[in-house]
Amino acid sequence: MEIVNDGWRLEGKPDFHVRHWPQPGERFDTVTQEHGRHERAVQLTVAELTATHAIVTGVGGELLRPGDYLFGERNAEPNGGDVDLGALLGLSPSTAVLDWSGAEAALGVTLPRDYKRFIGAYGPGTIDDCLIVNGIGGQYDLAEENRLARSLVRMDFGDLDAWSEEAEWQLGDAAHWTPDRADIPSWFQPGDDLVAWGSWTSSPLFLFWHVRPNVPADAWTVVLKERGPYWERFDSGFTTTLAGLLTGDLQSRYLSRWLSGPHTYNH
């Protein structure tokens, strides 16, 4: 790292496809070590970015150390209903009619309409051979995948009984949380829930809807949970988040390097 003018010159190669690189004027808000450890907040604006270095200005540059990773987020507009995910993935819709009552009863929620439209048209499958989108029945059954996803998250939230195979308490039941809630994110409150619509093929990583009391399903936002107490939050739902990750309008410290395209959907 070198101090230049009113900022810092950072040597290193962006760890994402070029379509995900932040543009001059966009911001980095988080710096971590490898695997998201030792996270620190910064307010750094990108002045210049090339394949070999970045120049940033703002607050927090003095916190940077060799080997650090910088992250930011591009906020997608909440117009996901206008995005044609099928066209983005090169798919042709089917005419299947699905009965969601069993899955919704098992999960205890009514699912977002844009998600049900996508699964109804294209079914569950795998994007770019790495990101699984759950559906009804088969290998990527939504209810079955949620049993696994919730059990793993429960281990981070709960006390000793969370490690029991019989543990089935709701994630929002604060009576089971560790007293200091050290691994429970501050934005997750008693009564909230998580419903997993996606996962990673090679690691315990899940994409959830953040379910909150009195918030309609179509307004649920997406959160990502990686192994350990590491989360990412997006200010949008299923379609806008997924489309943003595929086009590069949204940046994820965990997913963007793998979703560079061209995109495929195996179902």
Image: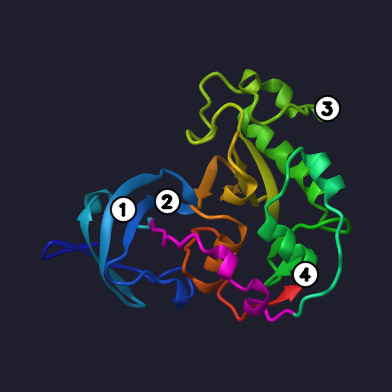
Q: Name which of mark 3 and mark 2 comes first in the sequence.
A: 2
CA gap, disc 4 to disc 2?
41 Å
- The residue where tag 1 is placed is 65
Taking the image as shown, residue 172 lies to the left or right of residue 106, namely: left
Left or right, residue 239 beside residue 125: left
- The amino acid at mark 4 is Ala
Query: Residue at label 4?
Result: 121
Quarter occupied by the N terminus: bottom left
Structural crowding at the residue carrying mark 2, measured as other residues with C-alpha within 10 Å and reported as few (<14), some (14–19) or many (≥20)? some
Q: Nearer the viewer, mark 4 or mark 1?
A: 4
Front: mark 3 or 4: 4
Query: Residue 230, percent across and down?
Result: 53, 44
User: Does the magenta segment cover residue 86?
Assistant: yes
Secondary structure beneath dot 4 equals helix
Residue drawn at point x = 62 percent, y = 74 percent:
84
User: As shown in the figure, which amino acid type bears the numbered disc 3?
Assistant: Glu
Q: CA distance from mark 1 to mark 3?
A: 44 Å
**Is mark 4 in CB contact (under 8 Å) with mark 2?**
no
Residue 201 seen in the current view: no
What's the magenta region? 69-91
Residue bearing the label numbered 3? 166
| Pointer 1 or 3: first along the chain | 1
Q: Nearer the viewer, mark 3 or mark 2?
A: 3
Ranked by sequence position, the earlier of labels 4 and 1 is 1
Q: Amino acid at mark 2?
A: Gln
Q: Position of residue 121 (x, y in %)?
A: 77, 69
Amino acid type, callout 1: Arg
Image quadrant assignment for residue 5: bottom left
Q: Residue at x 42, y 51 (%)?
A: 33
- In terms of image quadrants, where is residue 54? bottom left
Q: Is residue 42 above or below residue 229?
A: below
Q: Which residue is mark 2?
A: 33
